[in-house]
Image: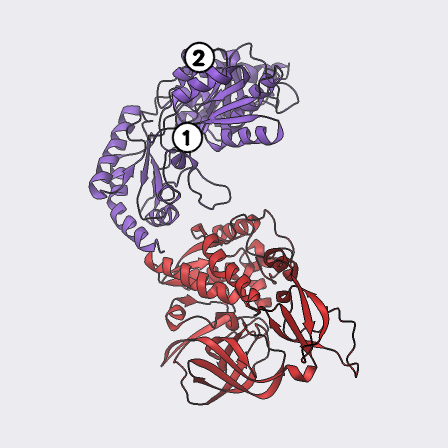
Chain colours: A red, B purple
Amino acid sequence: MKLIAAMSGGVDSAVAAARAVEAGHEVIGVHLALSANPQKYRSGARGCCTIEDSHDARRAADVIGIPFYIWDMAEEFHDGVVEDFLAEYAAGRTPNPCLRCNEKIKFAAVLDRARAMGFDGVVTGHYARTEIGENGKTLHRAVDHSKDQSYVLSVLTVEQIEGAVFPLGDTTKVDIRKEAEARGLAVAQKPDSHDICFVPSGDNAGWLRDRLGSDVGPIVDQSGTKIGEHKGAYTYTIGQRKGLGLTIPTPDGSPRFVLKIEPVTNTVVVGAREDLAVTIMRGERPVWCGPAVDHAHRIGFVQIRAHGAALPCTYYVENGLLVAILDEALLGLATGQAMVIYDGDRVVGSATICETE
Amino acid sequence: MSSIYVDHAATTPMVESALLAMTAQLAQLGNPSSLHTHGRATRKTLEDARETLAKEIGSLPSEVIFTASGTEANNIALKGLYWAGREVGKKIVVISSIEHHAILDPAHWLATHEGAEVIEIPVNSDGVINLDFLKDLVKTRGEEIAVISVMHANNETGAIQPVSEVVAIAGEIAVHTDAVQSFKKVPLSFAQLGVTAMSLSAHKIGGPLGIGALILKRGVEIPSLLHGGGQEREIRSGTLNAPSIVAFATAATSSYYNAGAVVGLRDRFISSVQALIPDAVINALAAARLPGIVNVTFPGTQSDTLLLLMDGQHISCSTGSACSAGVHEASHVLLAMGHSEISAQSSLRFSFGATSTASECDFVVSVLPDVIARGRAANLP
C-alpha cells in the first residue's frame, strides 16, 4: 500500500513508520504542524508541536530512509480541536481534545488529503490493533493495556478505520523503545508526551481562564444555598473535591464534591459523595467502529476515560442516543467525555456523554 | 529512474574544474595570514583568486571581501551601511518589498533593535520595483536615508530589477544590491552598475557551499559584524578559506553556464505549461528575467502538496525560498506582486541550470497534468 506516516517527532510514530516500511509498504513521512507559532524547544510534557519535534521527526524519517514533509494543519487544528475544546468547557462539559484531533485531523483532514493524492491510508504510532473479519476491518485494544489508545480512536468510522494502519498494537511500550534503539532512532529515549499539547504550561485551568475570562460565581449546595465562590466555572470538573476553597463545613463534616456545572448561571453545584453516583449514561452523536448498534440490549463494557477501567454494562440505542446501564454505580461522570463501548477487546463505537442519571 | 533536478536557484552542481581546484588546495598547508613560506604560498594562490574574481565582477581586487555566505555579505552590507549612516544622523533603511530574507530580516532587526526606520519600495504585478516611489522618497526624505538595498534579480520569480536607475536616483546615498542570483547568469559589472556594495555567493554558480563575497567600494568604511584578526579590510575577520575561495574563482571563470541554452529550456517549459494547463499563471512574465527561473501559479492547488507529488515522480522543484521550520508560508514576493494568500500558496518555482537538458524539461512537463489534477483533488475545503 502507499501510506502516509504521521510523525510527531516521538518514538512511537517513528517506529510505526519504520515497521510499515519493513512490511513492504511505500511510506512517506509527514509531520503535522499544528501550531501557527510553534515554540523552538519542548518544555514540560509536550511532544509534538515544537520546531524541535519537527526536526526529530525529520531526522527519524531520514534514518528510516523515507521522504519527509511538513503539512501545515494549524488552521484545521485551531478550528476543529482548540475551538471545540474552549466551546465545550464554556458549555460546562469536559472534552477530550486528543479524540477530537483523531476525528477531525489525523483521520479526516490528513486521510482525506492522502487519499486524494493517491495514497491508501495513514500510519500512526497509536497503541491499538485492527483485525479483518467477517464484518470487515475492526478496531481493537492494544496488547499493552496500560498504553492502549483505542479510547481516543473510538471516533473513527468504518471508512476511516479502513484507511488506518496501527503497527504498534501488538507490542509493549518498553519493547518499542528497545526497537527504536536497535533501529538507531535518536528518539528512543524521548520522554512520553502527556497533558494537552496546546497548553504548553500544563496549567489547564490557567489556560482556560486566560481565554474564557474568570467571572467569579457562586458555589451552591443542592438546596441552592450559596456556600462559596469560584473563579470561573469551567475550571472545575465533575467529581472534583480539592481546590473548592469552601469554609462552611457540612453538618457531619463529610467532604463536598462538584456535582454539576451550570455555565448559563455560572454556578458550581456541590454535594455529598453519594450524590455523584451514576448508573445510566446517554451519549449523543454515536459513531460505530463496526456494525451499528440498535435498540437490542447487549452486554459489554463502557469506558469513560482514556486510561480508565472498562465497566461492565448493558448498552443499546434509544432515540438516536447511545445508552449504557452500568452494572455498578460510578462516582463522578462529566458530560462532554466520550463513552466508548467495548465488546471484549473490540471497540464497538462511541458517543459524547450528554446526560447521566 | 534517475531523479530530475529543477531547483538550480537553490543550489547547482559544482563545476568539475572548481571541485578539482578545491581538493588540490585542501591538500596545501598554510594560513594565508602567516608570514612564513607556507603562509605566503597560500596567500599567493588566494590573491590570484581574488584578482580573478574581481575581474569577473568588474571590481578592484581590494573591493572583494570574502565571507562565509551571501547571507553574511548582505548582513555586513546592510547593517554596516546603516550604522555608518546613523553616525551622521541618517536612520532610514530602504529595501524593496521582494528582497530575500537575508535582507528583509536584517532590515527589520535594525528597526527593532537599532532605531532604523524601514521603508519598502513596492513592486508592480510583474515583480519590478516602482521607481517613481523611490524618486519621491529620495526627493522628500533623501537626507535621512542611510542605505538603499535592491536585489539585482529576484530569487523566486527571476525578475531583474532596474538597479542602474536606482543608483541614478540615489545620487550620494549608498546603494547595495544582492546579486546572488544574477552573477554569471546575466551581464553584471560592479563598476558599471555604480553601486556601493554587492553580495555574491559561490554555490549558485558552480562553486562550493560556504563561501560568498561582499564587493564594497574602495574607501567606504563600515563597522564590522565579526571582530578578530581583521583579515578582510578590518571589516570581516576569520582565517581565509583558501580552498573555497580558489574554487569560487575557478567557477567564476568557467564557461559552464550557457545562458542562451538555459533561456531555450525555460521558454520551452513555459510554452508547454501554457499549452497543457491553460489556467496556469506564469509570474513576472512581462518582466526582464533571469534565464533559468520560472514561477508558476496553479490555481486551486497547494504548493506543498504539489511539491510532494513532484518529489514522488523524482522531480526536485521548490515552493519558493526554503523555510527553516519547514512550514510553507505564502511567499512575500508573490503577495507583494498582488497575489492573494491562497494563490501565493498555489505556486511552484522551477529553476533550470547549466546541467539541465531538454529531456529533463520534457519529463517535468509530462507529469505536470496528473500532478496538478491530484493536487486539485487534494485541496479540500
Query: Could you tell whether B83 is left or right of A299 in the image?
Result: right
Percent x, y for residue B134? 43, 20
The extreme left residue here reads B275
Q: Quadrant of the C terminus of chain A?
A: bottom right
Chain that bears disc 1: B
Q: Amino acid at mark 2?
A: Gly
Picture coordinates of residue A108, whole percent (x, y): 41, 63
Q: Residue at x 31, y 38 (%)?
A: B296
Residue beneath the point at 39% across and 20% down: B132
Three-letter amino acid code at the position of disc 1: Met
Residue that label 2 marks = B194
- Left or right of A207 in this view: A150: left
> Relative to residue B335, is residue A42 depicted above or below?
below
Q: Quadrant of the N terminus of chain A?
A: bottom left
Indicate the position of residue B324 as horizontal and vertical percent values: 50, 41
Q: In what element is the residue under mark 1?
A: loop
